[in-house]
Amino acid sequence: MSWQEEYQRKLISMPEAVGMVQSGMTLSIGIAASEPVGMLEELARQADRLENVTTWTCLPMRAYDIFMKPEMEGRIFNENWFYGAPDRAVHSEGRVSYTPNNLHKAGIDKLIGHNGRLDMMLGVCTPPNEEGMISLSMGAVAEREMIDSADKVILEVNRNLPWTDGDVVIPMALVDHFVEFDSPLVQVSSATPNEIDELIGHHVSDFIDDGCTVQLGIGGMPTAVADFISDRKHLGIHSELLVDGVYKLCASGAVDGSRKTLLPGKIVATFAFGTQPLYDFMNESDDVLLMKGSYVNNPYVIAQNYRMISINTAIQVDIMGQVCSQSIGTRHFSGTGGQLDTHRGAQMSEGGKGIIALRSTAKNGTISTIVPTLAPGAGVTVPSQDVDTIVTEYGSAQLRGLSVNKRMEALIRIAHPDFRESIREEAHRLGIVPDKQFF
């Protein structure tokens, strides 16, 4: 049988595909820009016949009815690895729950936690190429593990998806059914840096020299970092997420990967989202590899990159050096994702550094993000024993190996001036750092 015949044999309609979902099933959904838009919309249309269906998601990019509408209670329950705005909006209604994880083990741990049981995987792919292979296109965070484990795999073929190489390329034999649905790709523009982002970006860029390998995220601060390092030479990219900032660094000539010690010359990531210029850059590129999250985010893999610089952000940092990036007190906000993976891996790299960058205040300057203790109930994303370097608009504090009293003083120096004395006074009052120190 030719691949063309195999494809036609497996091609079914959208209602047929979603009609295979039955009450009580567990479904793994493609992550972020790998969401199967058509099937998720059809699932809402067929929800009246379903009960107790569980979905596994991560960073949903759209507010789908199956997750947002109150009438889905008892029909669809969402277990999410990394909250986005839709999840935060409905968390209090009890139809979504967070699954703690480190990204490099997220898929494997999820399967272990459910005794390896997964009824169905719903994802996206490109049309087949001339060899009859398909690309999962936008990422392989845990998609490959789910494809290998699910009883049934249905992929939504979208001609708008860029063809990417790496672990995302698979044979049609791994897929049970295809549906065709050409949805527009999600477009996530990089935020324009403000004055504070620029100050933070400047301080972070001081740690990035020619030849470093960099992990960047999305937002105003990472965009500012990318702007400040656009004059560097021979940078490499090994990043959980591939974003517009990486594309712009390549366009500026700063990135060529020539000094990378792991996969020289290759831009390595596990998933991508951004704007159309990034997708055009990725499409059929020999330089871009999208690999499994279990590989890209494995700290021991990250550590093989010479002078690896990991840049992440946070919500709060306390004087012990504990970093919270996932919740506002007890209110869950996002997730651990790959932050601890990349932070640890960078520190294990020869000449590497793990950087946590954040604004010194929140809520229009009314509260400090550097605090004596994390807010009650806050999740610890990076433990104090793992912390390396903290950066705010007021400078950097290298905490590695420092005692708590010295960490406190280093962090106070980069806290907002309005809060410096109150941080020290509260630390003394609580007895975290006694007000009498002999050295």
Image (tube, rainbow, N blue to C red):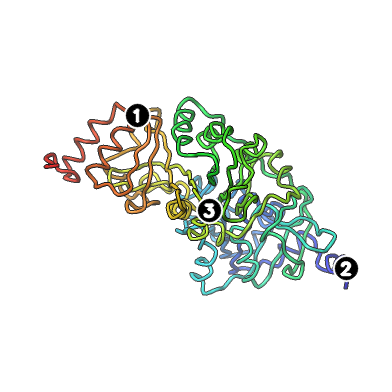
Q: Residue at x 67, y 50 (%)?
A: 288
Picture coordinates of residue 91, whole percent (x, y): 47, 50
Residue that carries the numbered disc 1 in the rendered image: 366
Q: Are marks 2 and 1 in contact (CB under 8 Å)?
A: no
Residue 75 is situated, as x and y percent measured from the top left of the image, at 58, 61
Separation of disc 2 and disc 1 at Cα?
64 Å
- Mark 2 residue crowding within 10 angstroms, few (<14) / some (14–19) / many (20+): few
Q: Is residue 397 above or below residue 116?
A: above
In this rendering, does residue 260 appear at all? yes
In the rendered view, would you say 5 is above or below 414? below
Q: Secondary structure at mark 2?
A: helix
Q: Nearer the viewer, residue 41 or 401?
A: 401
Q: CA distance from mark 3 to mark 1?
A: 40 Å
Judged from the image, the secondary structure of the residue bearing numbered disc 3 is: loop
Residue 5 percent coordinates (x, y)? 88, 68
Few, some or many residues within 10 Å of mark 1 (<14, 14–19, 20+): few
- Asked if the residue under mark 1 is in contact with the one under mark 3, i.e. CB atoms within 8 Å, the reply is no
Asked whether, in this view, residue 310 is left or right of residue 168, the answer is left
The residue where tag 3 is placed is 305
User: What element does badge 1 sit on?
Assistant: loop
Whole-percent x, y for residue 364 in the image: 40, 28
The residue positioned 65% from the left and 51% from the top of the image is 266
> If you read the primary sequence from the N terminus, does the residue marked by circle 2 or circle 3 appear first?
2
**Nearer the observer, disc 3 or disc 1?**
3
Point out the image quarter for the N terminus. bottom right
Residue labelled with disc 2 = 5
Residue at (69, 49) in percent of width and height:
287
Query: Quick one: label 3 or label 1, which is nearer the N terminus?
Result: 3
> Which disc is residue 232 wearing?
none
